[in-house]
Image (cartoon, rainbow, N blue to C red):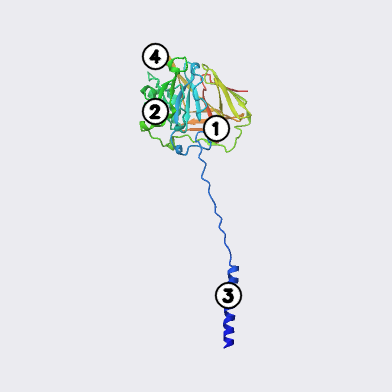
Amino acid sequence: MKKSISLILAVIMAFVLFGCSAKEEAPTTTTTETTTQPPAVVNPLTGEEGYNKNAVDVRPVAIVVENAPAARPQWGLSTPDIIVEGEVEGGISRMLWLYADYTSVPEKIGPIRSARPSFVEFSELFDSIYIHWGGSHSKGDYIGGYGRIKRDDVDHIDGMDGGELFGRDTTRSVSSEHRGILKGKKLPSAIDKKGFRTEINSSDFTKLSFNDDVTNAGAQQAPKVNVKFSSRTDTRKFTFNSEDKMYHTSDWKDDVKFENILVLNDKTTYITTPYKGSTTTYLNYTLDSGDGYYISNGTMIPIKWSADDTLKITDENSKEISLNQGRTYIALASSNNGGKITFE
């Protein structure tokens, strides 16, 4: 009996010891949690991070701003993502200001001016909602700004229609056409009231490429850039600042700076039409294709460009150009009527 009890106790002790040993030797597993960072939300016109996520895939706006001496300095010069400038008539240039996020347009910009066909067409390359105050009318062989808007069924807002979006500045002693302003904070509600499509049509929107880090445009130095739009216009002058790596100009009275400059050489046509008992000679850009320059970080490279449904920019070997992140100035220069670009 004692032997049986001893045997039973031995078996129990062996089981306990084996269980403890098995428990101690059991393999341990560890799990490592990995987190995937969401892609950065970037401004499609500047490539910069910190963009309003609610504006992703939303159409930009293209706003016509004048450049007569009496209009300078313009209100809001340092705020557009892209500024486009080219000749309109009488040797005067005009600008198109592009904002990717129309909720970011400041309270006061301008002076707002009238539509011209080439600027309407350029705005279409970015699937923009076009904003202007008046426009040129079609006469004879000339298709005016209003004619282009109607022909292409462009979504637009016209200051001639009135409304609370537009007003007149009272601080400057200049004629009324140089004082027309747009009240940016009222722009979202104005677009909403119009019932425009606000989602980008990707096939009609120019997709710009951007570098991760500041990169030379090319091997040729370009510390100064002078752009003359045609033989009739003045010259836009830019100087590169090596400290902030930006191109500066004071031609509009205020210091304005850009990371990138694009010069698009294009064939132009002068068209003379009757206007208020006299005549006006308008300039139209072809906006088909041409050559030009990409300028950034104190350097430049020759480019080729084409404009079908969207704007395409390549180097001379047909490789897509990638811009440095930041604001871009686009100059439309006549290739057949005295446009001129020089570097110093």
The residue pinned by badge 3 equals 16
- Of the two numbered discs 2 and 1 on the same chain, state the one appearing first in sequence: 2
Determine if residue 271 is in view: no
- Of the two numbered discs 2 and 4 on the same chain, state the one appearing first in sequence: 2
The residue pinned by badge 1 equals 326
Residue in front for this viewpoint, 77 or 208: 77
Q: Residues within 10 Å of mark 1 (few under 14, many from 20)?
A: some
Q: Secondary structure at mark 2?
A: strand
The residue pinned by badge 2 equals 156
Left or right relative to 253: residue 273: left
Label 2–label 3 contact, CB within 8 A = no
The residue located at (43%, 17%) in the rendering is 177
Residue 163, compared with residue 37, is above or below; it is above
The residue located at (41%, 32%) in the rendering is 188
Of tags 4 and 3, which is closer to the observer?
3
The residue pinned by badge 4 equals 274
- Of the two numbered discs 4 and 1 on the same chain, state the one appearing first in sequence: 4
| Separation of residues labelled 4 and 3 (CA atoms) | 110 Å
Determine if residue 98 is in view: yes
Give the image location of residue 35, x and y in percent.
53, 50
Of tags 4 and 1, which is closer to the observer?
1
- Mark 4: amino acid: Pro
- Of the two numbered discs 2 and 3 on the same chain, state the one appearing first in sequence: 3
| Separation of residues labelled 2 and 3 (CA atoms) | 86 Å
Give the image location of residue 79, x and y in percent.
50, 28
- Mark 3: amino acid: Val
| Separation of residues labelled 3 and 1 (CA atoms) | 72 Å
| Separation of residues labelled 2 and 4 (CA atoms) | 26 Å
Q: Quadrant of the N terminus?
A: bottom right
The residue at the far front in this view is: 2
Give the image location of residue 241, x and y in percent.
62, 27
